[in-house]
Image: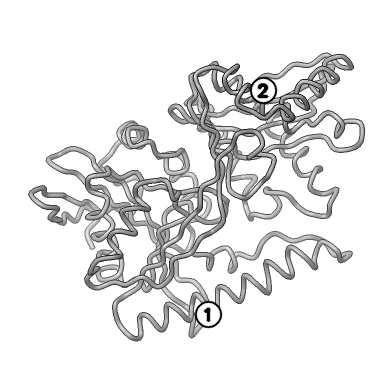
Amino acid sequence: MSNNEKITVCNGQDDLVCSIFTSFQELSISQDEWDAFLGAVHGNIYLSYDWCRIWWNHYGKGRELRIFIFREQGHLVGIVPFAIDPVGFWPFRLRTAKILGSDFTMVIVNPPIHKKFAESIFNHVNAALLNHEHCDLVCWGPLSSNYYVAEAVQKSLETDSGDFQLIRNAALGNYSVFPLPATYDDYVSSLSKNTRKHYRRNQKMLCSEHHIEYGVDNTASGFDDFVFMHESQWTSIRKLGHFGDWPGAKEFHRDLDRVHSEHDRLRLFCLTADGKPIVYRYVYRFGKRYHSFLPARLCGAEWDKYGLGQLTHMMTVEKAMEEGIEEIEAGRGHYDHKLKLGGREFPVLSFVIGKRSFFGLLRGRLFCMFADCLHLMYYRIWFNRLAPKLPLKRRPLWKLWIRTRL
């Protein structure tokens, strides 16, 4: 396949031209055009040019890159980057295609696609990967259920989908979003009376006992201190935390921080008490959205009494509104405290597509069964329940488990 192969896709009366690239160096699109389009369709930072490029540099070994660029009459209407990964063991070794950046971390990957062309682009990418690239499975996810691409995927799968079929439609839990009102006072007043009471009491107690400052520390030493605090917090309960669990995460995020700080996207918020850091919040800004990636705080009775998580969330909301932020995406997982603070939960969806054939369906389902067994035995039983209770050195997550999560 040529790096600049042109394929015409019909969508009613409109013609789409698709260019497929196998490296970032050969792209016919600039970083500025990529990110401007991502912002125009309200995409998240996890599929920005730099995030994709840096993820590929760290986790692309042994995989093949396919970046689909769609234009209609010369106008950019879709960017769909995929990594093709031969994963598993015989007879469950399949050639799988996943959206770039969808593994080795916990994020939402909503491919930037113009709403008008979402169905056509979904169908074309599937056909190209399954037929021309000889992939066995194509995974669209983790997708936000409230992003129109997920709706287009579901709509397309309800009709005759040609040469491909749905192997599995899975819900991967939830993720949280904080929609922000016009003013900070409006946000505070939207919380329950009990939540406001606890917030004001803890804020008053902390400020009466310490000199408090909340600002941004985007220096290299600030990131290292944040990682150390995050790891210390999790070590206290015999776990590794994000940077220990995910292989290569520390180096990956250090590169992300360096590059995104140059674009003024990094926000490493730090709460200090008498000049001493006691809480960090690792946040990125993209457009009018904050992506709150990870927190870290000092533990122990001395600090637990202040409700530091709630306090720094409120402080982050205030900083966000000063910057004109309209929404804070607060990551995956269900947390009651986020709901109490005004967060809204949305399902995270994953669609696994395979070839329309008996053996395609059989192999795809066997692979999913293998992946589910591995998830149950290794991740849920061993990694989460047994290993923390045993006097053994904790190890990062298995790469096989990471690569088989679809």
Query: What residue is shown at x 34% (from left), y 53% (from top)?
Result: 151
- Among the 4 quarters of the image, the one containing residue 297: top right
Element type at marker 2? helix
Q: What residue is disc 2 on?
A: 315
Image position, residue 102 (x, y; %): 49, 54
Left or right of 281 on screen, residue 233? right
Q: Badge 1: how crowded within 10 Å, few (<14), some, or many (20+)?
A: few
Q: Nearer the viewer, mark 2 or mark 1?
A: 2
Q: CA distance from mark 2 to mark 1?
A: 49 Å
In front of the other: 393 or 195: 195
Image position, residue 54 (x, y; %): 48, 44
Query: What residue is shown at x 60% (from left), y 34% (from top)?
Result: 342
- Among the 4 quarters of the image, the one containing residue 354: bottom left
Which residue occupies the extreme front position in the image?
193
Left or right of 130 on screen, residue 267? right
Q: In the rendered structure, are the residues bearing label 2 and label 1 in contact, judged by CB atoms less than 8 Å apart?
A: no
Q: What residue is disc 1 on?
A: 89
Q: Badge 2: how crowded within 10 Å, few (<14), some, or many (20+)?
A: some
Query: What residue is shown at x 48% (from left), y 19% (from top)?
Result: 324
